Image: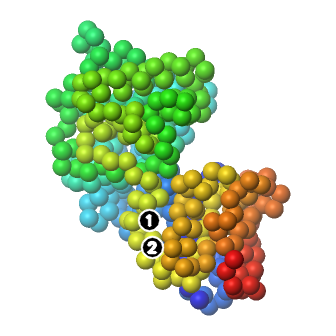
Amino acid sequence: MRILVAPQEFKGTLTAASAAAALAEGARRAVPGADVRATPLSDGGPGLVEVLIDAAAGDYLTTSVHDPLMRPVMARWGRLSDGTAVIEMAAASGLTLVAPDERDALAATTYGTGELIRAALDADATRILLGIGGSATTDAGAGAMHALGARLLDAAGVDLPEGGVHLQRLARFDLGGVDRRLRSCLISVATDVRNPLVGPEGAARVYAPQKGATPAQVDALERALARFAEVARAQLGIDLAAIEGGGAAGGLACGLLLVSEARIEPGFDLVARTLDLDGQIRAADIVLTGEGRLDEQTSFGKTVAGVARMARAAGKRVGVVAGSVAPRADRTIFDDVEACDADGGGPPPSSEAARDALIAATQRLLARVLSHPERR
């Protein structure tokens, strides 16, 4: 029997690689002699670099950049054998780089992400895979634009300071100094959200509170993003407000669209294509995936839903092992569902306990599969 295990990270407890190893161990214990293949996955958030670089035996690199508050930080990124650079904006502009009592949604900048892109260009990259999950920023990518040579000016021709709130005073873009190498470098921006840049479902109103913004600050950031979109439309003829996914990571992709050959892609689709996940699924008899919590949002673009969709299309039985399963979770997209925590309280607090629970849950799921081999 050939079993493919392809989970994403279990947030707070296990990386995608650790989760895949636990699922594989559980599968081997449940089905001795099985041919088990482990393929950790990412939707473009934290873990993207590790997933792609380890799978392709690529190289890890480290670059000194600026964090969301413009403090020095060492950021890790990677390079595939064909020269493609793999970057996580969270390594430079992520929320985890800022302590809870330091969070400043108004001042946080994507400048460091722009520095990482510039480092990839210095390494002769002609393609960049950029994961944009886990951001601390709501600056429409203005900081990244600045790091790549753009100037954002007020009505007096003065450069705006770093931080999304200052975009309320944006009068025009000066793109004359933008790094020319961006013209021949395709940037694939990987995200798992479809929120627009502005509006009730936009970057400020939906995500800025998670980054420390008060209601008044959310209003200020909304005005700033709206001004950014207004100037882009008037000066460059680009309607950023209409771009699906433009609100991801505080609008980072929107800024990159103004200075580079960038395109927004569903993170799962990009990773699946890079790893030939469809081919791996077709070669398997059973497919297992997993995430920290299965809930009502799972079926909307999440990694495990993507795995289920591909497995069903290939006619393969697909199961999911989750840290916990919410009462309203959509179970119908899977043939088999198993929770590590039957009480629904979430995955165990330690990585070791999470690993043991995941191994045991995988064994339970596969025991059920073996006793009822017919698909639902």
> Which label is found at residue 294?
none
Can residue 225 be seen in this snapshot? Answer: yes
Total of numbered circles in the picture?
Answer: 2
Q: Residue at x 42, y 29 (%)?
A: 139
Indicate whether 341 appears above or below 30: above
How would you rate the neighbour count of disc 1 (Cα within 10 Å): few for under 14, some for 14-19, many for 20 or more? many
Residue 278 image label: 2
What residue sits 75% from the left and 64% below the top? 340
Residue 272 marker: 1
Q: Amino acid at mark 1?
A: Ala
Where is residue 314? Give x, y as percent: 50, 77
Q: Quadrant of the C terminus?
A: bottom right
**Do the residues bearing badges 1 and 2 touch, measured as CB atoms within 8 Å?**
yes
Residue displayed at 54% across by 67% down: 309
- What is the three-letter code of the residue carrying label 2? Asp
In the picture shown, does residue 294 fall above or below 200?
Answer: below
Specify the farthest residue to the top: 156
Q: Secondary structure at mark 1?
A: helix
Residue 77 in view here = no
Q: Residue at x 61, y 27 (%)?
A: 101
